[in-house]
Amino acid sequence: MASAVMVTESTARDPQLYGTLPKGEKEEPGSPIAPILSSGLQVRKAARAKTLTVPTSGLAPGHLQANLIVLPSRYAADFRLLCARNPVPCPLIAESAAPGRYDSVKSCLAGGQEVLSDDDECSVDLRHDIPRYMVYRDSELVRAGATDIEDEWDEDDHVAFLIGCSYSFESALGLAGLPPRHTVLGRNVPMYRTRLPLCPAGVFTGSTYVVSMRPYRLRDVERVRDITRGYSVTHGEPIAWGWEAVHSLGILDVDAPEWGEAPIAADGRPLGQLQGSDDEIPVFWACGVTPQEAVMRANIKGTVMAHAPGHMLLLDCKDHDIVATSFLY
């Protein structure tokens, strides 16, 4: 059975972020409208101006997207080690140029590939350039969905880390005729806690993978794997797929993600109602919420800031540059 996507009035994309079709024309399933925000700079400026406050999936196609975690500097070395020991869920792509810097980052990519332009016009302000943030104090959530973190940022101490995001390979999937359903419907990707353990590092112990999920037909999974495999700095290929993977990962209910929005089947039903079918199966990727979860489980002291799940920092480098320069396997 063909895996068509139903686009309804309630799920259509926001016309402020995406173009509108000519009068009388309808959006074709699997053919998302081209985004107005087509560069990393445009997305950052929109977030900074508070005109963009929604998830960034599908924005600025071809540009790298990054998760953000901001820590007191005393935890920075342990966090770098956490990323080094867990490169699939925690692919470190850049960090603050120096403690306290919110306007400059240094690349951690192989070959030193820069992720932000040196042009002053393409400046970054990590305190404002993400649509939504989370703020934790002494490992307790104190602000959710904040539109900036300027008041919380310590210009003498905080260190920001940018972690690769799987949104970065979604444009490649779309070009191959395999657009993730949440991008077509304008929804946030579902994300789940799992029981798959992380390799510990310093204060970061006892944590587990977080995964994102995109449903596909079973016969399409090998193509999806082939397309995403080269994106090693944005989580790479799926780590698990199929209905049996829901249980093996320790996910209690595929229709009740801890973050994002519940997945919808092609016919509009909750995805879980198709359990056992090969027409649509859950496909799971390691997720950049993993380090955020690890930080919270570490019970560290002080103020920690992060992106709100689904709300990323858009960078200036292109996905194809990262695939070409990253370590491949």
Image: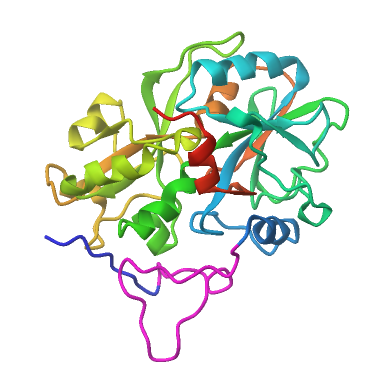
Q: Residue furthest right?
A: 156
Q: Quadrant of the N terminus?
A: bottom left
Magenta stretch in the rendered image: 10-38
**Residue 92: percent from the left, percent from the top?**
58, 29
Q: Residue at x 44, y 62 (%)?
A: 186
- Residue nearest the viewer, comparing 309 with 4: 4
Chosen colour scheme = rainbow
Q: Is residue 83 left or right of residue 306?
A: left
Q: Quadrant of residue 286?
A: top left
Q: Is residue 325 left or right of residue 184?
A: right
Q: Residue at x 58, y 28 (%)?
A: 110
Q: Is residue 272 left or right of residue 317?
A: left
* Magenta stretch, overall SS: loop
Membership of 28 in magenta stretch: yes
Q: Is residue 192 above or below residue 44?
A: above
Q: Is residue 51 above or below residue 161?
A: below
**Residue 219: percent from the left, percent from the top?**
16, 47
Q: Residue at x 49, y 23 (%)?
A: 87
**Residue 57: percent from the left, percent from the top?**
49, 54
Q: Is residue 299 visible?
A: no
**Residue 79: percent from the left, percent from the top?**
63, 19
Q: Quadrant of residue 159?
A: top right
Q: Is residue 117 visible?
A: yes
Q: Is residue 16 above or below residue 239?
A: below
Q: Quadrant of the C terminus?
A: top left
Q: How many numbered marks are there?
A: 0
Membership of 22 in magenta stretch: yes
- Residue nearest the viewer, comparing 138 with 284: 284
Q: Is residue 320 above or below residue 92?
A: below
Q: Residue at x 56, y 46 (%)?
A: 65
Q: Residue furthest top?
A: 202
